[in-house]
Amino acid sequence: MLNIVVALMPEAQPLIEALSLKRRADSTAFSVYSSPSCNLVVSGIGKCNSAAATTWLAALGANQDQVWLNAGIAGTRTEPLGSLFCAHSVEDQAQAKIWYPVQVASPLLSKPLLTTDAPVTDYNNNTLHDMEASGFISAALRFSSAELIQCAKVVSDNTDNPVSAITEPLVRELINDNTPLLQQYGEHLQTLADDLIRPDIDRMLHEFTSRWRFSVTQQRQLQRLLERHQLVIGELTTLPESLQKLRSTSSVLSWLREALSAVPYENAP
């Protein structure tokens, strides 16, 4: 399954049409559009909205080893309008935190991407600038393998075409022109996802469920977290003392989530 997170409807509409997506009636917090092979959520502007929409989409049924793609527009200094890039690094300017998406062979050239809390107008370097990617990545890392979490951005503004000149028709045109390449990129990532071998976590799962009494829902969450832990950090051959001291199942799940959140992209396989 390909899961796409975009900020606004002008970015989403060309993809919705090209991928034959239909509006989901069961999604109230965010607008979600789906087909048997793809989900798309419209997050709204900003990294907090992007993180919340990513988490919402995952709650609607995304599983381990699904593809997550943050698609949309971005500014940069010299690249021409309509150029499409993937991000080989994503930096949050306000938090001074950086992630390094695992690079996979693809038709897209890559550039660094800086997420800011306000639109960039000075274009003092040739980094891509957006307002969503860091929120998307920080959330998506909880739900899939690092190599399946990517950002693809179409250049919408530069020194000759400032952000103040962006219009909804321009955004739709830029995304529409790049929709075939975005589809190709998503299909490539999906092929990679299909080739991934799910880790054998039966021993780890038994260790946890014999020590703590998880509900059925919590067991599903536990399995996903242990699979992610094995892929990103490695197998828990022994339980750390700090983990063994925990009494509640919710605190155990929180411990695993915090351990995964502390791992930067460059340490992921």
Image (cartoon, helix red, strand yellow):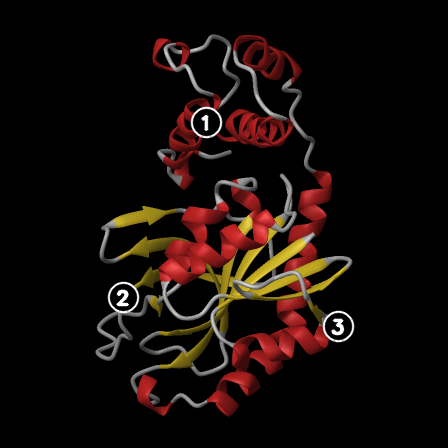
In the image, taking residue 149 as reference, residue 241 lies left or right, namely left
Of 34 and 175, which appears nearest the observer?
34
Query: What secondary structure is marked by label 1?
Result: helix
Lower position in the chain sequence, tag 3 or tag 2: 3
Q: How many marks do you count on the picture?
A: 3
Residue type of the residue flagged with mark 1:
Ser
In the image, taking residue 116 as reference, residue 260 lies left or right, namely right
Of 190 and 80, which appears nearest the observer?
190
Instruction: Please give the residue where the numbered disc 3 appears in the rendered image.
Output: 20
Instruction: Please give the residue where the numbered disc 2 appears in the rendered image.
Output: 117
Cα distance between the residues tagged 1 and 3: 39 Å
- Looking at the image, which residue sits at the far right? 36
Query: What secondary structure is marked by label 2?
Result: loop
| Few, some or many residues within 10 Å of mark 3 (<14, 14–19, 20+) | few
Q: Is residue 76 above or below residue 66?
A: below
Residue type of the residue flagged with mark 2:
Asp
Of 111 and 63, which appears nearest the observer?
63
Instruction: Please give the residue where the numbered disc 1 appears in the rendered image.
Output: 250
